[in-house]
Image (spheres, rainbow, N blue to C red):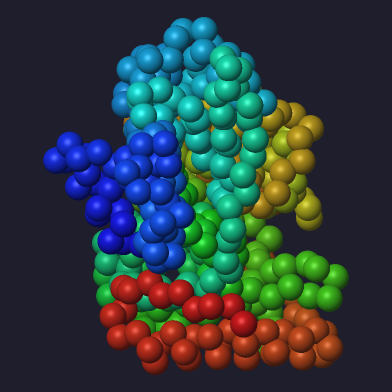
Amino acid sequence: MKRHQIFYAACIVVGVSCAPVKESTSQQPVSELPPSDAKEAEILAVQPSIELLIESEPKTATEIVTVEAGQSLMEILRVYNLSPRQVITLVSATQSWLDLNSITAGTRLQLMLDHQRQVTAVKFQVGFAKMLVARLSKDKWHVSELNMATEHVIRYVKVEVGNSLFNNALAADIPVGIINKLILVMSHRIDFQRMLHKNDELEVLYDAEVLSTQSLLGLQSMPRALRYVSLSVAGKRQVLYHHKDENGKSAYYFADGKVAQSFLLKTPLNGARLSSTFGKRKHPILGFTRIHKGLDFGAPVGTPIFAAGDGIVLKANWGGSFGNRVLIQHQHGYRTLYAHLQGFAKGIKAGRQVKQGQVIGFLGNTGMSQARHLHYEVHKDGRAINPLHLDSNYVSHNKVTEQQLAQLSRTIAEIDARLSIARSEHFDPTQKIALAEK
């Protein structure tokens, strides 16, 4: 077959007629050819149409475009010969999924182009493992969702805390959501502003969902749950295991079965430094000495502030010298105050129920404030108390029953088995690994 294709091409190059394969112009009837030659002639007769069909197939191409600062969708797509009307109808057709009028810098688009570089389809990633495909046909966009295949993995990371737990964990590819979670669950026991040292070590095991095939447009993986966290503090390890009981309730436990969740957080934000403590001090603006009824934390403006515990918002408004403030009522006569906020989180207002760790506002410099910071107070039955003493004086840990402890022990054994594999197979302490879920 290959020999016949070469022969046909040679005919065209030298200008030789291929007429012998056509009955009307053949100098020797096909019937007079030997059987094998007749078969070859039959093949050659249809070969040109096959070759021409292949050459006439439209060529397509794919391009990835990254939106730059200040660019609009109209500006991007007009380069590819889409009319303003076509771009406007694309925005309208996809508005149930995303707002293309407010497309942000860094967003990636996948364009499907025909041989004339006309756009035939546009793809967007609208969430983890979800693609939006808009196909253009006769000036009309047809939009569909495409769910991408995923796999469940368990990831393990070990890293030194260094000068910043958050930054070093991020550099070791621990997702931000997992970092925030481990800080939240560990903050019941550890003062991240004062207790950590450069050589302390962090070790985590967490669930993640990863794409089976690489995405060209965005997220490759999505963290799901922090299953294990260990933090060495001055040579002493604090270890927590994630466990879900028979009722589906999740919590973090110490190996002895004590629940690790404190009633209130003593540090209601991440990555801050303690700039002023509880007790007598000279007021930085008023100039005289008086009791400082809370803690001050310095951090960048806009840093999220968390609810220290479950409760009901009593106030979320302007509070005079406190500036923008939030006041939350908790159980057992406790209240917490968060002052000098830049603003409030969406939906935070008087009467709103909040959960521990929920974002309620953002650090600012409002009211009688000399510099950007959070002023945080804890009150018990109307009396201000030192938040740093919450763990030792105002928090109790509930222990599980014997039956629950047996279930917890099985969870701990499973997690420890995973850890044993991770530690033995990987020697680089900052290397991230993936273990297939069995």
Q: Tell me if 352 is positioned left or right of 218 in this view.
A: right
Tell me which residue sits at (32%, 23%) in the image: 69
Residue at x 50% of width, y 30% of height = 121
Residue for point 39% across, 64% down: 34
Quarter of the figure with residue 234:
bottom left
Q: Is residue 189 or residue 43 the one in the foreground?
A: 43
Query: From what the image shows, is residue 281 above or below residue 265?
Result: above
Q: Nearer the viewer, residue 326 or 251?
A: 251
Going by the image, does 373 lie left or right of 380?
A: left
Q: In this view, does 297 lie above or below 34?
A: above
Residue 161 makes an appearance in the image: yes
Residue 234's place in the image compared with 392, above or below, is: below
Decide if residue 80 is on the left or right side of residue 337. left
Q: Quadrant of residue 406?
A: bottom right
Q: Nearer the viewer, residue 305 or 94?
A: 94
Q: Residue at x 78, y 67 (%)?
A: 249
How far across and down, in percent of the image, does residue 334 sit? 71, 50
Is residue 322 shown to the viewer in this render? Answer: no
Q: Position of residue 426 (x, y in %)?
A: 35, 85
Can you give x and y, in whole percent of width and height, for residue 401 in the image? 82, 85
97 left or right of 364? right
Q: In which quarter of the image is residue 422?
A: bottom left
The quarter of the image holding the N terminus is: bottom left
